[in-house]
Amino acid sequence: MSFKSAYLNDLMERVIKRNPGESEFHQTVREVLESIEPVLEARPDFVESGVVERMVEPERIIKFRVPWLDDNGKVQVNRGFRIQFNSAIGPYKGGLRLHPSVNLGIIKFLGFEQIFKNSLTGLPIGGGKGGSDFDPKGKSDREVMAFCQAFMSELCKYIGADTDVPAGDIGTGAREIGYMFGQYKKLRGLFEGVLTGKGLSYGGSLARTEATGYGLLYLTEEMLKCHGEVMKGKTAAVSGAGNVAIYAIEKAEQMGVKPVTCSDSTGWVYDPDGIDAAALKEIKEVKRQRLTEYKKYRQNSEYHEGKGVWTVKCDIALPCATQNELDLEDAKMLAANGVIAVCEGANMPTTAEATKYFQENGVYFVPGKAANAGGVAASALEMSQDSERIAWSFERVDTELKKIMVRLYHNIDEAAKKYGFEGNYVVGANIAGFEKVVDAMNAQGIV
Ligand code: NDP
Ligand code: 2IT
């Protein structure tokens, strides 16, 4: 075990025993416990109040059958999940992932991360996450609708604008949110802000679609500025080709950064002239095609099968696809090629070993719970607009988002410094996120 304190060693052991085989969940809990060790040394009362034991145990886990009919009239059965992890600072908030790899451990890891991320936004949102092992890829619109309606038929019993507000994640975009919202409204008879990432015609927020990717770049810019670096003229390697990657690429271009790569689960693109965000939107958002199509838009580009984004020379790496997609070998390659900053657009895309390598080799590293918090922050702004029954302008949301990301960077930077870990943004993010949640939990008693 990796802790100095017997208390944390014992707690980690219990987490592993109680959640067998859930390696991603163990990974995120271990990281957070390591980070907060100095806080617990300074505050033995946190140990006495059992606040950390309570924090690693979800308030509620909901697991359900999702039966639906495919286009051949055959019954399909998926498994649905919602984990309501922590409501100390606000209603549960977090996305719904639709991907064949989804299982309880994955949702638990994402829900746990979400507690600290949501705390870091400074907005009143608790942590939750959900999803299903349904694969939207290759399904017709009708099949996706049938699944979303069946999924919401059960989920609607547990969520609401003031209790739990889901949103998008991998595989869940505007189309899926629309079908789910329609079914919630029909079954509950309520037109309320129960989901975020909604369409603009029925209560969505301008700039929510862009928010995760834009926020990632706002934070990266602020961090580099504080280290005496500028964005303009830098080259970025981006992985993924979905919601987060597309708008990270778009904002990078606007800032004068050249994003030279993107990827999906089958291959990756290198474009020496800079990835064309408009082409990517058409391929992925409109036509739902593979990245092999990209060459039709940009003849100078290369398409490669498999994994390879991190072999490209760049100044900034922005992993925006999925967990543990950047390993130690990738980290060594990036560092050898002169990368100066790695900021996570996805949730936990960098393995623990790779993270350590970056930190020990002078690469600025910002974890997803800080760097990608712009998405959920804009979701909270969507909740505000729904409550007010008013729609803010794009500029207003975007300006708020930028302020939130800049403030968030300084918060994690200061938290790291306060405990003698200057420049370690993993420790800074975990401590800053933890402190607010602990304060709220302790104030509310043993519940
Ligand atoms: P999308 O579904 O829009 O895009 C996901 C992208 O990552 C796709 O290009 C997909 O390729 C690729 N990908 C997904 N799973 C794998 C895999 N197992 N192996 C290789 N490539 C994969 O999702 P988002 O862009 O919304 O999410 C990306 C990441 O960002 C996730 O970690 C998510 O949790 C995180 N995130 C998302 C937020 C949001 O607001 N959407 C907010 C904060 C974090 P393919 O299409 O081929 O599957
Ligand atoms: O991981 C995330 O923060 C998200 N998928 C967005 C969650 C949200 O509620 O907007």
Image (cartoon, rainbow, N blue to C red):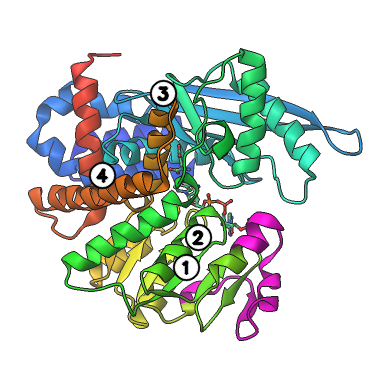
Amino acid type indicated by mark 1: Val
Q: CA distance from mark 4 to mark 3?
A: 30 Å
Residue 192 percent coordinates (x, y): 51, 21
Q: Residues within 10 Å of mark 3 (few under 14, many from 20)?
A: few
Question: Disc 2 beta carbon < 8 A from ligand 1?
Answer: yes
Q: Which residue lies under the disc numbered 4?
A: 430
Please report contact status of discs 1 and 2: CB closer than 8 Å, yes or no: yes
Q: Nearer the viewer, mark 1 or mark 4?
A: 1
Q: Is residue 172 visible?
A: no
> Looking at the image, which residue is at 63% across and 80% down?
298
Residue 295 percent coordinates (x, y): 67, 78
Q: Nearer the viewer, mark 3 or mark 1?
A: 3
Q: Which mark is residue 238?
A: 1
- SS category of the residue bearing label 3: helix
Q: Residues within 10 Å of mark 4 (few under 14, many from 20)?
A: many
Q: Which residue lies under the disc numbered 3?
A: 387
Question: Disc 4 beta carbon < 8 A from ligand 2?
Answer: no
Q: Which residue lies under the disc numbered 2?
A: 245
Q: Which residues are magenta?
A: 281-310
**Residue 282 falls inside the magenta stretch:** yes
- SS category of the residue bearing label 2: helix
Amino acid type indicated by mark 2: Ala
Q: Nearer the viewer, mark 4 or mark 3?
A: 3
Q: Which numbered disc flags the more N-terminal residue, 1 or 2?
A: 1
Q: Which numbered disc flags the more N-terminal residue, 2 or 4?
A: 2
Amino acid type indicated by mark 4: Asn
Q: CA distance from mark 3 to mark 2?
A: 30 Å
Amino acid type indicated by mark 3: Ser
